[in-house]
Image: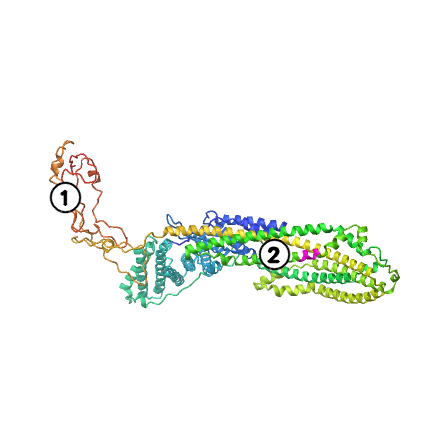
Amino acid sequence: MATFISVPLKKSSEVDLVKPLSKFVTATYPTGDEQGEYIRAVEELNKLRRNALGRPLDKHESSLEILLRYYDQLCAVEPKFPFSENQLCLTFTWKDAFDKGSLFGGSVKLALASLGYEKTCVLFNAAALASQIASEQNLDNDEGLKASAKYYQLASGAFGHIKDTVLSALNREPTMDISPETVGTLSLIMLAQAQEVFFLKATSDKMKDAVIAKLANQAADFYGDAFKQCQYKDNLPKYFYFQEVLPVLAAKHCIMQANAELHQSVLAKQKKRFGEEIARLQHAAELVKTVASRYDEYVSVKDLSDKINRALTAAKKDNDFIYHDRVPEVKDLEHIGKAALVKATAITPPLSQKFTDLFEKMVPMAVQQSMSIYNQRKAETVNRLVGTMREATNLCNGVLASLNLPAALEDLSGDSIPQSIAEKARSIVQQGGLQSIEQLIKDLPELLTRNREILDESLKMLDNEETTDNELRTKFSQRWNRTPSGDLYKPLRAEGANFRSVLDKAVQADQVVKDRYNTHCDMIALLCKPENELNAAIPSANPTKTLQGSEVVNVLRAQLAQLDEIKKERETMEGEIKAVTFDMSTTFLTALAQDGAINEEQLSLPQLDQMYGTYNQRVQASLRSQEELLGQVQTAHQEFSSLKQSNTEANQREEVLKKLASAHDSYVEISSNLREGTKFYNDLTEILLKFQNKCSDIVFARKTERDELLKELQQSIAREPSAPSFNVPAYQSTPAAPAAAPAAPAGPTPAPRTVFNPQVPQQPQPKPNPPARPPPPSFTPQAAATTPTPPNTVPTGPPSGNPPPVAPPTQAQGPPYPSYQGYPGYYQMPMGYNPYAAYGQYNMPNMPYMPYQAAPGQGGYPGAPPAGQPYPGYPQQPPQQPFYPQQ
């Protein structure tokens, strides 16, 4: 009776995990020890997959441990990499575990760019291997029974977990082996087998009959549920696997119910209910008889049948001679209780006992995304503070340049270069002068063109693939059931549109910088000239030495010194603001562990306020101080201007000095802007190259998926019938009954190979009577004893002992023997007839043609041609001499 059901494993195609995962690690993490450690972990993950799926697995616990380790690692790595069709695209291909395919079409398989699909299939294999290991256990000892029950419950839990999660993990229709209906049925089967193992354990431990009866009745209930689940699901019976499983489930249901009745009869005997004992034993005997007649080729019940029959015979004998207790009907018997000792194992990773996360130090993608948003918020805060200070400094420089300060205080002599102007001229020369700016301006278009080409090439790849996908979707219509490229590429196209917008804004900013350079180009060129040429270019004016040492000049110099202090303080503060760091990953990890999600805004904003609140106050105080000082400077400058001698030469000189000071400030700002622009374009190039790689990867993955789907469609088309179905004429499908066949005794009815429907009892159909067998050829003994005629002699006529040729009937008749209903296409021959008995007698040369004697109601072979004439269409043979062997 120990027939247990196991599940075959799915087969997977090889997938290279190293290249895409390593590319992601290289692009995401900086070069160093951390990056190298993650790349080594990726290689270990690839080896783990090959060990788990790339070779046949033994039916041993060590092989199951490898599968569970790989499943646990997939669960651990899923939140740490952006596995999706439009980001990190890995296509996994798995074949249907039950569909063995056809000669030309191949087996059914599905390729998906989904890590959830990979997890589901790996868990299916773990459950299937657990069922195989459980089926291989030795059930004659306690260790084997315990291990078998453990693995069956694990398999049941794994199949049940797939049933609950497969649709959400795949977001599309799965193959039939991992569909909710199939894995739900398998989960019930594994649970029923685990309950049966507990029944066997209780039987071997000789527990009380009442307990054993409840365990057996519960197992019968589980098998009945699994049988109904198998039978009434439309898609399951088409598998040959389930066609073989159905009889086993039906037999196990009857066997466990018979065991329950057997042990309950012992309990009835102990309570002196002898009629109930007999009724239960009779019911058990009927159940076992049903199994023996219908499912004997699947399950052997001889020992159980003998045990029940012996108990039934003894019970009847005792009741007939001693107790004379009334035997009740089966329907009137008290229902046997149930005791479920099994439960599907909950699937909560880690399932492996030796699991260690290869990417333990890598933070999950949710944390990475939160860190990215946090870093953007931090950068915005820093840029806002630094930008505010730089704008204030530029405003201060512009106001002082418009007042010709501090050059006006240094130019009291009226004929020499002010010291501040000389220093600014030397600063410009040291920074490269006009040549450096012109070279930076010249490089910008090349950098812009390179970035535009990378972006255009990336989007072109998406366009070409989407065009191909749309063409195939139009061609195959609903059969082309993968995600449309237009929907899949929406995030990438939005990202590309954002990059194009950034480039357009950069072009506008470049033009602003160029216009400003053109405005101050002449004065910047003047500052780049030698000191004597610069002095000659500045108009001279009457001396104003009377102002030297005046109170107004001293006040202005003190105020300018305070403004310089404010500028230096801002430079120091800018460095401090950029140097502020804080690791938010710990905070995000804690929130993820506690709540299962991260509210980045709620966590980031208070932390940023805490870090930069003080600096924000200092920046605002600096702005107020500058505004107050600039007001004082303007008041003092008005007094200073009123004291100066006003003439045309002095005004021209002051105007030139203002332009020179403004040109210096513009040169510094333009140089800074151009360097920032160059850095921006170079950084954008790296970002666009990553974007191009992302587009290339997804296009390649889509191409691979497209090729797989095309191959599947070709196989599917090859499996389809080439012509529409048509109705077969009745005279071809149903043989006509022989008209004059004598009745023959019917033989025993063999057990059907298909499982019966318990709700619709089937009546055994009488076997049709075979027609009469044709008479054997008759021979004349005297003819057999005569001397053979020489070979060259032509016979004058047929021998007198042979029957004359029979003409064919006027209409077509059915096959010579009726077909048995349970075996389509198999024609049973009558008893005693052996068509090969005379093979050795008649398969020899010089044998005359023996016409076939047709039975009544049966079509014969075409009649023989007239004597001496060959068959039409065949080469003429030399004449043959008759020869009759002795009988």
Query: In which quadrant is the C terminus drawn?
Result: top left
Q: CA distance from mark 2 to mark 1?
A: 100 Å
Residue 378, image x, y percentages: 65, 61
Residue 514 falls inside the magenta stretch: yes
Res. 503 mark: 2
What range of the chain is rendered magenta?
512-518
Instruction: Check residue 618 in the rendering and tell me which mark sits there, or answer none.
Output: none
Residue that appears at 72% across and 59% down:
574
Question: In the rendered image of this protein, does residue 826 appear above or below residue 266?
Answer: above
Q: Quadrant of the N terminus?
A: bottom left
Q: Position of residue 421 (x, y in %)?
A: 79, 56
Mark 1 residue type: Pro
Q: Is residue 316 left or right of residue 655?
A: left
Q: Is residue 851 above or below residue 680?
A: above
Report whether residue 104 is seen. yes
Circle 2 — which element? helix
Q: The disc labelled 2 sits on which kind of residue?
A: Leu
Whether residue 205 appears in this view of the structure is no
Quick one: which residue is furthest to the front in this view? 648
The residue singled out by tag 1 in the image is 805
Q: Is residue 501 left or right of residue 876?
A: right
Q: Secondary structure at mark 1?
A: loop
Disc 1: CA contacts within 10 A as few (<14), some (14-19) or many (>=20):
some
- Give the mark, 2 or 1, whose residue is nearer the N terminus: 2
